[in-house]
Image: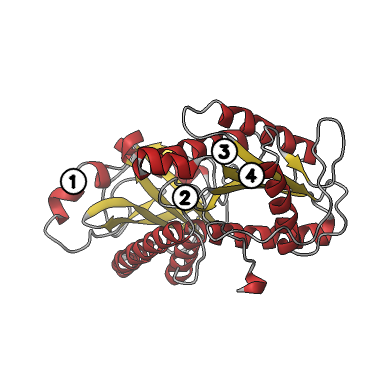
């Protein structure tokens, strides 16, 4: 679990490790979703029965079928310690060596899925019921005993510690890659995703498009109305960018810093990205604050020559944005396009040098 990069990998590691440790043939990890009153399966591993999936989209069970969580867990263990695991068998109540909460539905599930017994260990996190660790053996395999149940109790405690660590890491990642004012991604995440996107483009030709935006008039808003009002403009524009970006599957919207924002799209055609940028410009012009937005677009789907680095694509988008700002264009400027409705952007490798307040993208290769 410590080596896992995502909560999903962490859950799989916990279930698979418990299955191996207990000599089971199947294991699952489930979480109690209190607001929905259900126990939802995060992962199934081992020998899956018909209809089971490793990462089910919506395999869940009413929590009233799990009285060990919903009814008496807090009363028994609120003072500390860990809840004891127990064993159930496909033969029904009282048949196993370690009896516990009996559930008709779970016994029927053992029979239906060709399993002979299971050990169930509630997971407690931060003093509250979090979910369950479930390990089963196939029909005909030895039935779990008291020692197995005690060991499962320990494994559930270890799993709880791993879940706590995963939550801390997720929060750290969120803080590391999120702009605190707008809630959008920050420049650090754009660096990573743009490098990955360009690598993919070089490998298989996937279209990569970058939209760079600069809010017009933010300094005047800050000077005349105060930075709190300026922050409100930044938040409002961030919401517009997120809304327009939603039209592009998988698009990443971010605040690069100051009054600069960007949108990264991997896969959609260049025309779709330009349309989203045009809609953004139109909506930004209707905001009650500021003076609209200067917007530049660079896409590998346009005639911009070979793109083999994130730095080059960003420079083209930044140059297009600079030209849009200089011309006070109400539409996005698109690198590589020339026509009656598209301001001209030549393929300059290096845009004009930014002023002291202008933030520049820096790829990992420049760090």
Seen from the viewer's position, the closer of residues 350 and 123 is 350
Q: Is residue 180 left or right of residue 361?
A: left
Q: Is residue 77 left or right of residue 31?
A: left
Residue drawn at (37%, 65%), measured in percent from left and top?
165
The quadrant in which residue 227 appears is: top left
Query: What is the CA distance from the residue labelled 3 to the residue labelled 1?
Result: 48 Å
- Tell me, yes or no, whether the two marked residues, 3 and 4, touch with CB atoms within 8 Å: no
Crowdedness of circle 1 by 10 Å Cα count: few (<14), some, many (20+)?
Answer: few
- Tell me, yes or no, whether the two marked residues, 3 and 1, touch with CB atoms within 8 Å: no
> From the image, which quarter does the N terminus lie in?
bottom left
In the image, residue 39 lies at what x, y percent?
Answer: 38, 42
Q: Secondary structure at mark 4?
A: loop
Query: What is the CA distance from the residue labelled 4 to the residue labelled 2?
Result: 26 Å
Q: Which residue is mark 1?
A: 72
Q: Is residue 72 left or right of residue 197?
A: left
What is the number of the mark on residue 48?
Answer: none
Residue drawn at (69%, 35%), measured in percent from left and top?
329
Q: Which residue is mark 2?
A: 42
What is the number of the mark on residue 251?
Answer: 4
In this rendering, the label closer to the viewer, 3 or 1: 3
Q: Which residue is mark 3?
A: 241
Seen from the viewer's position, the closer of residues 42 and 155 is 42
- Tell me, yes or no, whether the two marked residues, 1 and 4, touch with CB atoms within 8 Å: no
């Amino acid at each position: 679990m410590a080596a896992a990069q995502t909560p999903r990998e962490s859950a799989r590691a916990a279930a698979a490790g418990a299955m191996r440790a207990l000599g089971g043939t199947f294991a699952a990890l489930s979480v109690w979703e209190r607001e929905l009153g259900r126990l939802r399966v995060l992962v199934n591993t081992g020998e899956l029965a018909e209809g089971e999936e490793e990462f089910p989209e919506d395999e869940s069970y009413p929590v009233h079928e799990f009285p060990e969580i919903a009814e008496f867990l807090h009363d028994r263990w609120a003072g500390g310690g860990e809840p004891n695991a127990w064993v159930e068998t496909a033969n029904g109540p009282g048949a196993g060596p370690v009896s516990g909460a009996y559930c008709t539905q779970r016994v029927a599930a053992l029979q239906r899925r060709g399993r002979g017994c299971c050990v169930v260990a509630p997971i407690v996190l931060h003093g509250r019921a979090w979910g369950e660790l479930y390990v089963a053996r196939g029909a005909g395999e030895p039935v779990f005993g008291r020692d197995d149940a005690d060991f499962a109790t320990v494994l559930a405690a270890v799993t709880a510690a791993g879940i706590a660590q995963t939550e801390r890491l997720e929060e750290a990642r969120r803080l590391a890659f999120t702009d605190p004012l707008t809630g959008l991604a920050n420049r650090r995440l754009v660096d990573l995703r743009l490098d990955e996107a360009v690598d993919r483009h070089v490998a298989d030709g996937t279209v990569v498009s970058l939209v760079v935006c600069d809010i017009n008039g933010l300094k005047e808003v800050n000077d005349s109305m105060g930075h709190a009002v300026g922050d409100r403009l930044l938040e409002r524009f961030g919401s517009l960018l997120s809304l327009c970006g939603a039209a592009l599957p998988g698009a990443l919207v971010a605040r690069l810093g100051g009054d600069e924002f960007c949108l990264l799209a991997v896969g959609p055609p260049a025309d779709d990205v330009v349309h989203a940028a045009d809609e953004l410009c139109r909506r930004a012009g209707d905001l009650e604050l500021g003076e609209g937005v200067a917007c530049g677009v660079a896409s590998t789907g346009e005639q911009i020559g070979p793109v083999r680095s994130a730095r080059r694509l960003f420079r083209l988008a930044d140059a297009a944005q600079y030209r849009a700002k200089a011309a006070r264009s109400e539409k996005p400027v698109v690198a590589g396009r020339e026509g009656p409705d598209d301001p001209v952007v030549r393929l300059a490798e290096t845009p004009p040098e930014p002023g002291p307040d202008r933030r520049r993208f820096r790829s990992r290769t420049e760090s």
